[in-house]
Image (cartoon, grey):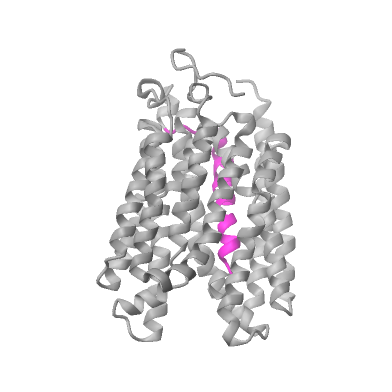
């Protein structure tokens, strides 16, 4: 049983006043993260077809515009996540979730009636700028869940997001033949409308602007992060970026890599889809368990262990001779990567004053989406210069470097924890 909330206690923290709501809110946020991320990834299988339908003719232009349209959402989210996190600290977490859900319903519907590729790109960018339901969910659950269960809660939330990323392309491959491409966007908007209704009428939050929306001290008002902790914050953000950088470094060119393994061109896209989904499948299997492990043994230990394990699984991917070997290794990679996001989120939640948590978690989301943008760029350049196998070696080296940084941050964090206040 959860302890009762304490809305009338002047000294009660935000977490204590929402103790009776966090599990219910977690369930709604998991569903919302699933539906919104499924909607974002749903267009992957038919995006080039839609770009052609909007008047782009040459194959090279179709590829170029498809890439721009797909990445525009992540760029928008990376830019605005810290802003929404800051507003969540000032005005509450629930309004940010309502904004994200309603914004996605409107923009997804508008994508279904786009007249040209420029409107498509602009609307995809707008999706990132005003959407971000999963990011806002991380802020809410990261601040409402009890400290000793935050890792588990963020792991469960991560599972919902990963399941959405895994399911979206599958749905996107099935619905267009039934509803048409434009009809698929309207169906997606309808699905997210359910999330919006659950968020408006089902989500509960006890937010007091007089206490939760103001800084406790002048020092907190000047930034919310003690100077002594700046290195730890940097390590948290860098590690968050590396999670998606590691996963995305090979994704855009994985079809080419699989083609070099002898897969017939008639089956190439289907096999590539299976391999791409493998890492998400692995993460779904272990995210909640590794989040709970972070609650028991400490987040830094889980982060260092997962970074080293991911690097170890990354290297053999350069030597595979069959596509199924690559798929198995990507499942294992997903299982090791899964422990990073909940552990990092738990660290971010504890690193600053409660009134600054949303802002820092917003920066963390921005760092993660930056990794999703930077990863393909670095991977593509390394592949062109040194060959495709070199991408795996490069990513493994970055992960090892990040593990050394995380180990150093763990040492500093332990030393600061034993200093007198």
Please indicate whether residue 14 sits to the left or right of residue 260 in the image. left
Which of 220/172 is in front?
A: 172
Question: Which residue is outermost to the front?
Answer: 178
Report x, y in % for residue 186: 34, 60
**Is 316 covered by the magenta stretch?**
no
Please indicate whether residue 229 sits to the left or right of residue 190 in the image. right
Report x, y in % for residue 267: 59, 82
Quarter of the image holding residue 127?
bottom left
Quarter of the image holding residue 359?
top left
Report x, y in % for residue 372: 51, 60
In which quadrant of the rendered image does the N terminus lie? top right
Residue sitting at x 50%, y 69%: 377
Q: Would residue 325 be visible to someone looking at this image?
A: yes
**What is the magenta range?**
223-250
Type of secondary structure dominating the magenta stretch: helix
In which quadrant of the rendered image does the C terminus lie? top right
């Amino acid at each position: 049983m959860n302890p009762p909330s304490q809305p009338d206690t002047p000294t009660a923290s935000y977490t204590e006043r929402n103790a009776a709501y966090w599990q219910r809110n977690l369930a709604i946020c998991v569903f919302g993260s699933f539906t919104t991320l499924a909607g974002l990834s749903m267009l992957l299988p038919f995006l080039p077809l839609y770009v052609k339908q909007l008047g782009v003719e040459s194959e090279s232009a179709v590829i170029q515009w498809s890439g721009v349209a797909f990445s525009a959402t992540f760029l928008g989210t990376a830019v605005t996540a810290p802003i929404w996190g800051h507003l969540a600290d000032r005005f509450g977490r629930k309004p940010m979730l309502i904004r994200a859900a309603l914004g996605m319903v409107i923009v997804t519907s508008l994508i279904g009636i786009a007249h040209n590729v420029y409107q498509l790109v602009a609307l995809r960018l707008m999706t990132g700028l005003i959407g971000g339901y999963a990011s806002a969910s991380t802020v809410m659950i990261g601040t409402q869940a009890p400290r000793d269960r935050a890792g588990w809660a963020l792991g469960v939330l991560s599972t919902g997001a990963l399941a959405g990323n895994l399911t979206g392309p599958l749905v996107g491959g099935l619905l267009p033949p039934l509803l048409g491409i434009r009809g698929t966007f309207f169906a997606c908007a309808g699905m997210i409308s359910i999330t919006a209704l659950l968020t408006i009428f089902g989500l509960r939050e006890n937010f007091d602007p007089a206490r939760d929306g103001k800084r406790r001290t002048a020092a907190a008002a000047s930034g919310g992060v003690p100077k002594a902790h700046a290195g730890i914050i940097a390590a948290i953000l860098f590690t968050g970026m590396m999670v998606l950088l590691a996963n995305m470094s090979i994704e855009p060119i994985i079809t080419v890599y699989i083609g070099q393994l002898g897969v017939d061109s008639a089956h190439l896209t289907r096999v590539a889809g299976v391999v791409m989904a493998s890492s998400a499948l692995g993460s779904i299997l272990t995210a909640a368990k590794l989040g709970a492990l972070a609650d028991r043994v400490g987040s830094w230990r889980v982060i260092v262990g997962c970074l080293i394990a991911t690097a170890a699984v990354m290297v053999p991917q350069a030597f595979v001779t069959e596509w199924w070997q690559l798929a198995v290794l990507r499942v294992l990679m997903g299982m090791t990567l899964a422990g990073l996001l909940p552990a990092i989120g738990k660290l971010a939640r504890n690193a600053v004053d409660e009134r600054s948590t949303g802002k820092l978690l917003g920066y963390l989301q921005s760092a993660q989406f930056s990794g999703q943008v930077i990863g393909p760029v670095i991977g593509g350049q390394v592949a062109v210069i040194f060959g495709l196998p070199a991408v795996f070696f490069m990513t493994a080296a970055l992960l090892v470097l990040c593990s050394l940084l995380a180990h150093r941050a763990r040492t500093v964090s332990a030393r600061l924890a034993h200093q007198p206040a």
